[in-house]
């Protein structure tokens, strides 16, 4: 067990099982995002790709896989929704409390392969968190990408995530469209689902599409995009499951023979569908 | 582990022949009168686990207690044939399939990964008992090689599995004939995975040596060499193909099996290669100290794919029914170039409704 905080700590890509390498890190900042969601920040140097995840644990409670929602070598952030046994206990942690972590695990978004392309980033609900790392990466390297469209779906304004980043992103020539299915109480938000704000999206060969959200949203968004003429090879989805071991053994996250924890969670659409 | 230890080094590095018709393993002849000498040597290696009849209420993880021996029950009514600690060679049953597999000797049903007290964490670091698994059939022996692929042949290794595995000596019984009507091992391309393997030659026992570990035991007996070879038995049940990819969407056929499925998980708990697990924390009442454990789980349970928020990714029973079969015959092969099924037939033998998924696949082959 290591308890390092401000000192440099590099997470290893190939971590051992739970028994070996849980690291307890003090939380450097907690931000309440919505009634259920909290953003935890750890000022620890770590190497990771957006879309990868950590196994966050509390001894005696259990472990939960949480996607990284930042893109920086200096720190990492985790957005946790209080919804299950473990996450409801994680969300009561305060600044200075220790969280058990192992990771980062999985295959994230390979941002280098998207360079030179137009980007369409689609997130729904808490699925906006994993793609925020992608957007931050684009923001930092804006010159490397073509046009950037961000499409988000939320229930209503009070469920919005990362609204505070919107103006930064817009200032770097990214267009943001928002759909709200319960109440469109945010300026310029469309009443409806993400699929209702895809009209202006036109197929373009040099485009990468990144989707993360509830399974039903991914299914329908992909359906619409494929119908428009986009290729399966250009669509990248994040298929989150309840990963238990995170090293491709326990079988819980298996999708047609692929392990979401090691082969994914980011898949090219044609890899699994 | 030695380089040429076939039983523990299965895979591309293995030196022994896997060709069924021309094995070049060393063979020795053991007069039956000396069988107890072999047994003693095995006991010196470690605790001998062998197939014997066990009362259904007896704890099969313990040594046989004298009281439970019951000579007045020669038909073994109400008893199970299972792998259990055995002290006398006379108790070993040489025919039949043990009801349960031996997977718990490398991966116990509940295995501690770490223990904690407050924020102090101690990883599990015990040294498991040395054991001899005596009387495994080729199907169960192959299961060890398959489980090794998953837990040892890719990084990160599972440290507890490695420790259990290292302390095992695998002694097989060769099947001259299929043990019952549910066996279909000859459809599964099994390899010769063992440290030692025994078959009956009337006056003598032929012992094949499959590894360095086995040879070290056998050389203490100073036996005559023998080069007889026996073919694998022909099973009554045959699986016509393991290439089932193209049948995935033919739900009308899968439904014939699925309609009888109870989602009870018997097939997965009896399968020698089903080792999907859950990770759970167990604590004392105050929650201050406890253990994080890996526990057997089953993909046949609806909650296996439950995520927070309530979604089940394989909520339909037919998806779970197909998932198990596809994992066994297709998915594992895509990753490791070997089928995960060893043809032991336990999933059908032990199924409360005897779902014969082999026939379902054969039927689809015939439809082609």
Image: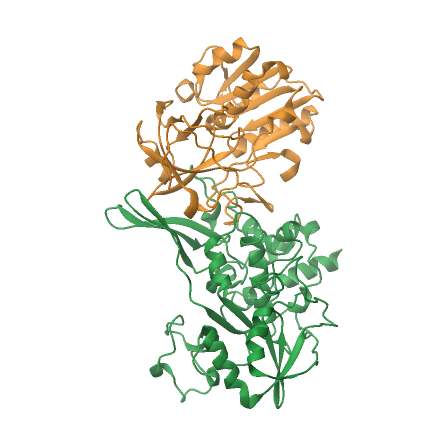
Chain colours: A orange, B green
Q: Which residue is drawn at 46% across and 10% down?
A: A187
Q: Could you say which is closer to the camera, residue A4 or residue A94?
A: A4
Quadrant where the N terminus of chain A sits is top left
Task: Name the image quarter holding the C terminus of chain A.
Answer: top right
* Residue B101 visible from this viewpoint: no
At x 64% / y 63%, what residue is drawn? B358
Q: Decide which of A228, B210 is in the foreground and name it.
A: B210
**Residue B240 rendering spot, x and y as whole percentages:** 71, 63
Whether residue B273 sits left or right of residue B286 in the image: it is right
Percent of width and height locating residue B139: 60, 68
Q: Quadrant of residue B112?
A: bottom left
Up the image or down, B229 lies above or below A144; here it is below
Q: In this view, does A65 lie above or below B358?
A: above
Where B61 sits versus A262, above or below? below
**x and y, in percent, of residue B241 in the image:** 71, 60
Query: Which residue is depicted at the point 66% across and 20% down?
Result: A117
């Amino acid at each position: 067990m290591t308890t390092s905080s401000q000192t440099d700590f590099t997470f290893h890509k190939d971590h051992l099982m739970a028994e070996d390498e849980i690291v307890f890190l003090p939380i450097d900042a907690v931000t309440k995002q919505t009634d259920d969601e909290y953003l935890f920040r750890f000022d620890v140097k770590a190497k990771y790709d957006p879309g990868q995840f950590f196994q966050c644990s509390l001894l005696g409670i259990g472990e939960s896989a949480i996607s990284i929602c930042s893109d920086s070598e200096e720190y990492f952030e985790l957005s946790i929704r209080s919804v299950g046994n473990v996450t409801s206990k994680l969300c009561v942690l305060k600044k200075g409390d220790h969280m058990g972590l192992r990771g980062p695990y999985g295959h994230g978004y390979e941002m280098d392969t998207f360079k030179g392309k137009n980007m369409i980033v689609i997130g729904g609900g808490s699925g906006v968190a994993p793609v925020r790392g992608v957007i931050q990466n684009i923001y930092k390297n804006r010159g490397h990408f073509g046009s950037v469209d961000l499409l988000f779906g939320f229930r209503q304004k009070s469920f919005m995530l990362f609204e505070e980043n919107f103006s930064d992103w817009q200032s770097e020539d990214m267009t943001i469209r928002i759909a709200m299915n319960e109440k469109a109480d945010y300026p310029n938000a469309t009443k409806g689902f993400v699929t209702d704000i895809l009209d202006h999206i036109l197929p373009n060969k040099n485009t990468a599409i990144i989707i993360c959200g509830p399974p039903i949203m991914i299914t329908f968004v992909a359906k619409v995009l494929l119908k428009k003429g986009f290729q399966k090879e250009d669509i990248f989805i994040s298929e989150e499951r309840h990963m238990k071991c995170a090293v491709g053994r326990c079988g819980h996250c298996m999708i047609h023979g692929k392990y979401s924890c090691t082969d994914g969670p980011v898949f090219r659409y044609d890899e699994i569908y | 582990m030695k380089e040429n230890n076939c039983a523990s080094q299965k895979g591309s590095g293995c030196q022994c022949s896997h060709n069924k018709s021309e094995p070049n393993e060393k063979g020795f002849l053991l007069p039956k009168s000396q069988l107890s000498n072999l047994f003693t040597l095995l006991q010196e290696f470690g605790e001998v686990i062998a197939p014997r009849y066990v009362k259904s209420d007896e704890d099969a993880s313990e040594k046989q207690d004298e009281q439970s021996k019951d000579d007045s029950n020669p038909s073994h009514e109400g008893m199970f044939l299972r792998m259990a600690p055995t002290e006398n060679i006379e108790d070993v049953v040489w025919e039949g399939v043990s009801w349960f597999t031996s997977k718990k000797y490398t991966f116990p049903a509940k295995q501690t990964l770490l223990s904690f007290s407050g924020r102090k964490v101690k990883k599990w670091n015990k040294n498991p008992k040395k054991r001899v698994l005596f009387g495994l059939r080729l199907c169960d022996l192959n299961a060890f090689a398959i489980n090794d692929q998953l837990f040892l042949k890719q990084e990160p290794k599972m440290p507890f599995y490695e420790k259990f595995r290292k302390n095992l000596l695998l002694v097989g019984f060769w099947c001259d004939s299929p043990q019952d009507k549910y066996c279909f091992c000859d459809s599964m391309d099994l390899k010769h995975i063992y440290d030692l393997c025994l078959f009956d030659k009337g006056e003598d026992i032929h012992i094949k040596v499959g590894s360095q570990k086995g040879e070290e035991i056998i050389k203490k007996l100073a036996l005559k060499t023998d080069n007889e070879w026996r073919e694998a038995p022909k099973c009554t049940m045959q699986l016509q193909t393991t290439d089932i990819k193209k049948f995935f969407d033919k739900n009308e056929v899968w439904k014939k099996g699925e309609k009888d499925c109870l989602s009870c998980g018997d097939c997965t708990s009896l399968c020698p290669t089903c080792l999907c697990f859950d990770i759970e924390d167990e604590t004392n009442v105050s929650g201050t100290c406890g253990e994080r454990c890996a526990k057997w789980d089953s993909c046949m349970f609806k909650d296996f794919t439950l995520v927070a928020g309530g979604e089940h990714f394989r909520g339909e029973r037919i998806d779970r029914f197909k998932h198990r079969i596809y994992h066994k015959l297709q998915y594992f092969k895509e990753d490791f170039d070997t089928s995960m099924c060893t043809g032991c037939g336990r999933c059908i033998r032990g199924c409360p409704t005897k779902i014969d998924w082999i026939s379902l696949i054969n039927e689809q082959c015939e439809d082609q």
